[in-house]
Image (spheres, rainbow, N blue to C red):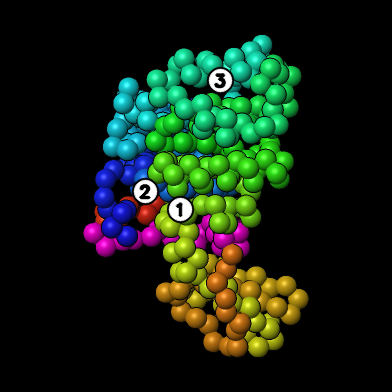
């Protein structure tokens, strides 16, 4: 994991508090997202994903603590030059054509890469079409093409897949993964489409109630948990949730399913044990807000302080 220790993190937050509308919606967030990786940002509605992305993009100022993007203040000229942000509202000029919009991107960005913008746009969106005549999903593709053309070092994308059809989702995730592999772009992408993050994301950040519930590499998160399935008659399920390391216990009919941390005490009984899918892992943590956070820890690295989710301030 030496690559994690070298150079500045794509996004680093230290003791970050962000207030909106008079209430604190991110509380004491400490995290480090390594550069050159695709990070999936997940969590329930209102968990703080948009607030975190907008803060990392320099659009919201922290009330307390700091956020750094490749070591720079995101609200500085050097920070802004290195990031591209696509929010959920995707403000574009409805009277401009797609071609006009991309020309505007070229004029505003000295390092503009028409090839990257064209790759993201794909071939199905006519360049002469006016933005106002496009569907929501097509506008998303144009907004993503504008962000790609900037050739930024960090892409911050708020639910980029939300209004895309399955083919477009596949196209967008492939283009993002290629960009991360070819240019070393750091990508932080929020999503509720958990099943489609498998194989796309290599880093995971789960925010819930304004705090970090999970943070670390996806492969470590999966390897650090087991999914146990057993017969209810043989496994005394009423005792199971109290065991340390059990994130979630669910009983359906005659089957009990447990999601257990690798370092936890395994309950007795005949269990079939397997590595969980990413979707199963995330769903278990989302359904179990009282379970302790899972934060990856690496030798030689500053361990981010785990922030557990309490009641919103
Ligand atoms: N403009 C705003 N003014 C006041 N409060 C806000 C504003 N935007 C968000 N909030 C509050 O901040 C908290 C976090 O919201 P945020 O939009 O960051 O969550 P999210 O995880 O992105 O949710 P979703 O999955 O629904 O997009 C919520 O309690 C929300 O009500």
Residue ID at (74%, 19%): 133
| Separation (CA) of disc 2 from disc 3 | 30 Å
Residue ID at (53%, 42%): 176
Query: Label 2 belongs to which residue?
Result: 34
Q: Secondary structure at mark 3?
A: helix
Q: Between residues 312 and 251, which one lies in front from this camera angle?
A: 251
Q: Secondary structure at mark 2?
A: loop
Q: Secondary structure at mark 1?
A: strand
**Most distant residue in the left direction:** 300
| Separation (CA) of disc 3 from disc 1 | 31 Å
The answer to whether one can see residue 164 in this image is yes
Question: Label 3 CB, ligand 1: below 8 Å?
Answer: no
Mark 2 closeness class: few <14, some 14–19, many ≥20 residues within 10 Å:
many
Q: Between residues 81 and 102, which one lies in front from this camera angle?
A: 102
Is 240 placed above or below 136 here? below
Q: Earlier in the sequence, mark 2 or mark 1?
A: 2
Residue ID at (51%, 46%): 177
- Magenta residues (range): 278-300
Residue 286 falls within the magenta-colored stretch: yes
Mark 3 closeness class: few <14, some 14–19, many ≥20 residues within 10 Å:
many
Q: Specify whether 103 is left or right of 131.
A: left
Residue 220 falls within the magenta-colored stretch: no
Mark 1 closeness class: few <14, some 14–19, many ≥20 residues within 10 Å:
many
CB atoms of marks 2 and 1 within 8 Å: yes
Q: Position of residue 114 (x, y in %)?
A: 51, 26
Q: Quadrant of residue 264?
A: bottom left
Q: Quadrant of residue 143?
A: top right
Check residue 102 in the rendering and tell me which mark sits there, or answer none.
3
């Amino acid at each position: 994991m030496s690559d994690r220790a070298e150079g500045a993190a794509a996004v680093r937050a230290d003791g970050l508090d962000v207030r909106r509308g008079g209430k604190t919606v991110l509380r004491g967030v400490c995290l480090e997202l390594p550069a050159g990786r695709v990070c999936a940002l997940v969590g329930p509605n209102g968990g703080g994903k948009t607030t975190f992305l907008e803060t990392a993009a320099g659009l919201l100022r922290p009330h307390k603590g700091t956020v750094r993007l490749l070591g720079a203040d995101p609200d500085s000229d050097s920070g802004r030059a290195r990031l591209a942000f696509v929010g959920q509202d995707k403000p574009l000029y409805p009277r401009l054509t797609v071609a006009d919009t991309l020309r505007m991107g070229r004029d505003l960005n000295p390092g503009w890469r028409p090839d990257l913008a064209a790759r993201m746009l794909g071939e199905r969106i006519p360049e002469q079409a006016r933005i106002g005549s496009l569907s929501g999903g097509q506008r998303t593709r144009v907004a993503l093409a504008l962000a790609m053309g900037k050739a930024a070092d960090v892409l911050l994308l708020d639910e980029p897949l939300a209004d895309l059809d399955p083919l477009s989702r596949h196209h967008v995730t492939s283009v993002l993964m290629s960009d991360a592999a070819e240019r070393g772009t750091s990508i932080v992408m929020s999503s509720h489409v958990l099943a489609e993050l498998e194989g796309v994301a290599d880093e995971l950040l789960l925010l819930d109630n304004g705090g970090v519930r999970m943070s670390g590499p996806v492969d470590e998160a999966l390897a650090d948990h087991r999914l146990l399935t057993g017969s209810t008659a043989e496994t005394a399920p009423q005792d199971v949730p109290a065991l340390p390391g059990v994130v979630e216990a669910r009983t359906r009919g005659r089957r009990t399913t447990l999601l257990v941390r690798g370092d936890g005490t395994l309950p007795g009984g005949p269990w079939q044990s397997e590595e969980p899918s990413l979707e199963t892992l995330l769903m278990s943590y989302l359904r179990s807000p009282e379970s302790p956070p899972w934060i990856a820890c690496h030798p030689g690295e500053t361990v981010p302080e785990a922030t557990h989710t309490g009641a919103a301030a």
